[in-house]
Image (cartoon, rainbow, N blue to C red):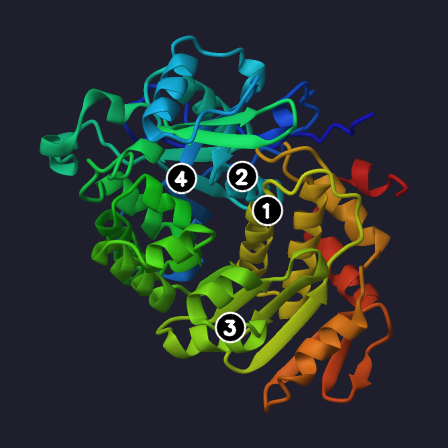
Amino acid sequence: MPLSVPSKTLTPPVLHGPSSFPSIFKPPCSTLHLLNRAFACKSLEIAAPSLSLHSNVPPNSKHVDVATLSNLCVDIVLNVPQLPPPSPVQRKAFMDRLAQSPPDKKYWEAGGNCNMAIAAARLGLNCISIGHVGNEIYGKFLSDVLHDEGIGLVGILSKDNSDNIIDRSSSDNGSYDTLLCWVLVDPLQRHGFCSRADFSKEPAFHWMSKLSSEVKIAIENSKVLFCNGYGFDELSPGAILLAMEYAVEVGTSIFFDPGPRGKELSTGTPDEQRALNQLLRMSDVILLTSDEAESLTGIDDPILAGQEFLKRGIRTKWVIVKMGSKGSIIITASSIACAPGFKVNVIDTVGCGDSFVAAIAYGFIHNMPLVNTLAIANAVGAATAMGCGAGRNVATLEKVVDLIRSSNLSEDDEFWFDILKKNVVSQEITYLSNVMNGKRNHLNLVSFDKVVSELLPRLDLPQTIRNVST
């Protein structure tokens, strides 16, 4: 029976944008688990602070921990007799037929960057999502989902100065609707994806050409601004660069995860290539899988690829390379930290990467040791994989704590030592291990028991949960 987590008292934030929906939201859930699922997640509500615009905000006066940029959508997961045909014209007609009558809400889930925001909020971070939702039923749903998770929503479109924000010459009525992603599952459990962004050469919200004062307020008052490659499906490269440049100006750290879109952007339009290169150079933290790191650098060694990003970067402090179930690596200018993953029964990997990013932000904001940051990030990602889908089903705090307490690391010393022995340099190398603290060749071994003893008090889990045996 799920444990009930007492909610904290909330002071609702101001909702910016054209919608009249409430401004604190609930977590999005993911795709593949939506079929015949029961929502058992209990939300941890976090006070969402009010925002105020002022320049050169020092980090210790920023009241929001994490702001996500764009990539807000509603996933609709449906069983279909057959997947849509490959022809773009036929696929669009297929999608239009589906959209004529909204499916039952049990098939809806918040998606995109909502996953990261929810996972971060459940770790106790104050979060806001910057993006666009429409005034229709899907926008209301997405707003409610975020509200229930204690996440504020800042609209990219302002009521008061929309004429100055929108490029009217290139907009149409449909471009103001909430973005939907149709996740289609055939009888063989194969998946197909359809979104209106697939059928346009322009981003879904290409009409957004400037930053509203509300968006600037949100960026200024946030410690971290997170964006990923899928943000290019909604916002123009120019708009994304405006947000990045403003974050740099006001001292907000930038997290960037290019994801699968990174390779496409690297060979895309000149504007896309320029924006991608600027993000990779100006971000404080870059997060990639080992395959993505290789595709953008041409280097198959994850540590050497990470060091290449550091060389190219101007502000880059951390490069995180995700190694799947094996674990993860942080590369900095002076050190390398590695942490194995956790042994879990994987049900669905959707949302694991988003959850992982949330925990990296947690460690970054709290100035935790690198290996501790990787440990909690691996735990949050693995806890999400134990459930079905993302959104409202991303890892709960209870599951994360249980997993950390289990100390069930999937150690593969041969795998890690093979990677690390190729990179014997002057940098300090730290490795998370089930053994006691010590040295092994050039490695500093950090005991997982030590990390657990430092992590658990930080997570501030309610006493009623701490006393439950695992």
**Left or right of 333, for residue 446:** right
Q: Is the residue under label 2 in contact with that under label 3 (CB below 8 Å)?
A: no
* Marked residue nearer the N-terminal end (4 or 2): 4
**Left or right of 137, for residue 346:** right
What distance separates the C-alpha of mark 2 from that of mark 1? 7 Å
Q: Tag 4, which secondary structure? A: loop
Residue depth check, mark 3 versus mark 2: number of the one nearer the observer? 3
Residue type, mark 2 in image: Asn
Q: Which residue is mark 2?
A: 115
Q: Is the residue under label 1 in contact with that under label 2 (CB below 8 Å)?
A: yes
> Residue 243: image x %, image y %?
28, 51
Q: Which residue is mark 4?
A: 71
Q: Residues within 10 Å of mark 2 (few under 14, many from 20)?
A: many
* Marked residue nearer the N-terminal end (2 or 1): 2
What distance separates the C-alpha of mark 3 from that of mark 1? 21 Å
Q: Which residue is mark 3?
A: 306
Q: Which residue is mark 1?
A: 355
